[in-house]
Amino acid sequence: MPTLGIAIITKNAAAHLDACLTAVTWANRVVVLDSGSSDNTLDIARQYGAAIHQTADWPGFGPQKNRCLDLLDTDWILALDADEVLTPELAEEIRAAIANPQADVYALPRLSNYCGRWMRHSGWYPDFVPRLFKRGSARYSDDLVHERLTFTGSAARLKHELLHYSFDDLDQVLAKVNSYSSAGARQRQQREQRASLGKAIVSGLVAFFRTYVLRRGFLDGREGFILAVSNAEGTYYRHLKLMYLNERTQA
């Protein structure tokens, strides 16, 4: 049977890490790469026998995930976020896939929970994310945020869902809007992109319309509206932050 390693990066990820690790106790090896947790994340990881590594710096999501991949020597790697949980059906499907592989990379259908609601519209479902791959066949992009797994060819799709506890409450939503808009602005500045107040307003409105109308977020009830607003805010503030970054650079 080919070996499987689990790659997880963490920082203050205690809320769902127990459930995440419980679902992968059958894997051959679990590596947790932590970037300065102050909660009991590492205690939970130790309880499950995970190999724990720590970094003093934060290079961004893509580079940090690649660091974690490099710590595994198993035949296959499953890259998970600490707030993602395999269903028993998905775990069995993964075991079958690596026992008789039909592809080097597999995408998992992800079902995300937003403030207590499972989101089946709003562009969030079905959210196929490439996560399972033969070691050496895939790497993450170097993006600070919204990193993606890069590989040659196309990914085969599994059927059973990966559960994603993306946001437990509005405090998490607002904190992520702030941190991701800042990182996104820095990333776009590195690519020499421009921004203005007018572009920020238009882009924010477009983001709301795309999420709530085109992607049928209205079918997700009040959380669909809240998500559409937060997407608009994230886009709006990312453009504004980029505008100010560029102005400071030019001054």
Image (cartoon, rainbow, N blue to C red):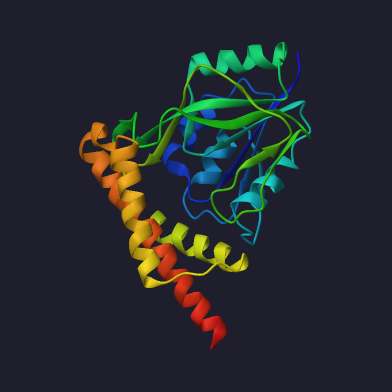
Q: Quadrant of the N terminus?
A: top right
- Which is nearer the eye, 213 or 159? 213
Frontmost residue, 46 versus 161: 161
The quadrant where residue 27 appears:
top right
| Residue sitting at x 51%, y 60% | 184
Q: Quarter of the image holding residue 98?
A: top right
Estimate the x, y position of residue 228 in percent, counting from the top left: 30, 46
Residue 9 seen in this snapshot: yes
- Residue at x 64%, y 59% (from the top left corner): 59
Q: How many marks?
A: 0
The residue drawn where x is 59% and y is 38% is 46
Q: Position of residue 199 (x, y in %)?
A: 40, 65
Say whether residue 28 is left or right of residue 225: right
Q: Is residue 174 visible?
A: no
Quarter occupied by residue 189: bottom right
Left or right of residue 152, residue 149 in this image: left
* For residue 162, above or below residue 173: above
Q: Along the line of sight, which residue is nearer the eye, 197 or 224? A: 197
Q: Is residue 62 above or below residue 121?
A: below
Image location of residue 26, percent across then percent down: 62, 20
The location of residue 143, given as percent across then percent down, is 61, 54
Residue at image position (48%, 29%) is 85
